[in-house]
């Protein structure tokens, strides 16, 4: 199943890093957080990616264009007939990556809308380029297919600083501005969408997390797969340092590959 990853935001709350590169390229353990996210999907069988670029998208293009050069031991033969020999094999060699420039000012719904022509299948996965989890993505897909709805999100339980979801079993019924219970779930940013999501998206100013998801909830078209394991986004320098510490400890919960 194809995976759309939104990589175009400016990451203003992580200005220490994003002044020079887009947030998905901020490193964890020497590799961009985007790479970690893609490895999570690939480990569960999903290796076709559509990256929706915006702010400093050229940095992401350069990373993938020079992927083998930057991640391999190399022997160069110089002279009039130069050759390059790479000595490293990568688990990523069967990935396909589409790099799609969706505009620097485009909102999340607009980026997703632009990605749809590159996602011909009935259902596909979507996430943002700054979140990590050990959630069972294929279980979310099974729930989505069973529900027959337009969208399924992964609902998680973080330390409360986000808006809470109203849930009725597996259906999302409403969005609440602030958590009201200790057991509240929030949108974890990992989605399964049917192509019908395009009917809920309009121009580049469309914000996916507002009217489109609200409409889906109101119409009973939005399901939730509840994940009680690890989840963490990277909005701040403190969160980046926390993820780096987990990686360096050798016990990063999202490392399922």
Image (cartoon, rainbow, N blue to C red):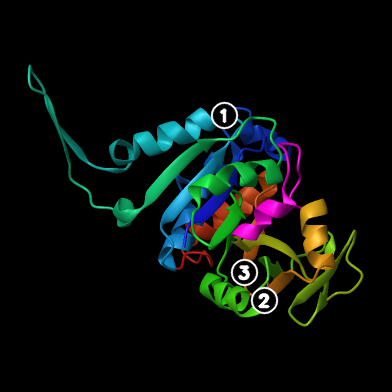
Q: Position of residue 19 (x, y in %)?
A: 63, 28
Q: Which mark is residue 230?
A: 3
Residue placed under numbered mark 2 in the picture: 228
For mark 2, give the secondary structure: loop
Q: Which mark is residue 158?
A: none
Categorize mark 2 by other alpha carbons within 10 Å: few (<14), some (14-19), many (20+).
some
- Which residue is pictured at 73% across the width and 63% down the height? 187
For mark 1, give the secondary structure: loop
Is residue 207 at least partly visible in the picture?
yes
Name the residue nearer the viewer: 128 or 171: 171
- Which residue is pictured at 54% across the width and 60% down the height? 124
User: What's the CA distance linking mark 3 and mark 2?
Assistant: 7 Å
| Closer to viewer: mark 3 or mark 1 | 1
Q: Which residues are magenta?
A: 195-210
Which picture quadrant has residue 104?
top right
Is residue 27 at least partly visible in the picture?
no
Q: Is residue 208 above or below residue 184?
A: above
User: What's the CA distance linking mark 3 and mark 1?
Assistant: 29 Å
- Which residue is pictured at 54% across the width and 67% down the height? 253
């Amino acid at each position: 199943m194809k995976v759309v990853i939104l990589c175009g935001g400016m990451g203003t709350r992580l200005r220490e890093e994003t002044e020079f590169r887009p947030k998905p390229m901020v490193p964890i353990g020497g590799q961009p957080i985007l790479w970690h996210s893609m490895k999570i999907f690939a480990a569960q069988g999903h290796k076709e990616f559509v990256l929706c670029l915006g702010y400093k998208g050229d940095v992401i293009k350069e990373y993938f264009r020079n992927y083998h050069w930057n991640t391999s031991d190399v022997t160069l033969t110089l002279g009039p007939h130069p050759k390059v020999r790479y000595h490293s094999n990568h688990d990523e060699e069967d990935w396909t990556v589409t790099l799609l420039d969706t505009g620097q000012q485009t909102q999340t719904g607009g980026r997703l809308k632009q990605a749809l022509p590159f996602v011909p299948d009935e259902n596909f996965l979507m996430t943002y380029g700054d979140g990590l989890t050990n959630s069972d993505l294929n279980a979310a897909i099974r729930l989505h297919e069973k529900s027959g709805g337009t969208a399924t999100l992964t609902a998680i339980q973080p330390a409360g600083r986000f808006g809470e979801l109203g849930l009725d079993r597996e259906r999302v019924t409403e969005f609440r501005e602030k958590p009201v219970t200790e057991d509240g779930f929030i949108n974890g940013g990992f989605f399964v969408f049917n192509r019908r999501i395009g009917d809920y998206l309009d121009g580049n100013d469309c914000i996916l997390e507002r009217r489109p998801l609200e409409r889906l909830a109101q119409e009973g078209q939005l399901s939730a797969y509840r994940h009680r394991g690890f989840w963490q986004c990277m909005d701040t320098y403190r969160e980046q340092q926390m993820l780096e510490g987990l990686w360096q400890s050798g016990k990063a919960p999202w490392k399922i590959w």
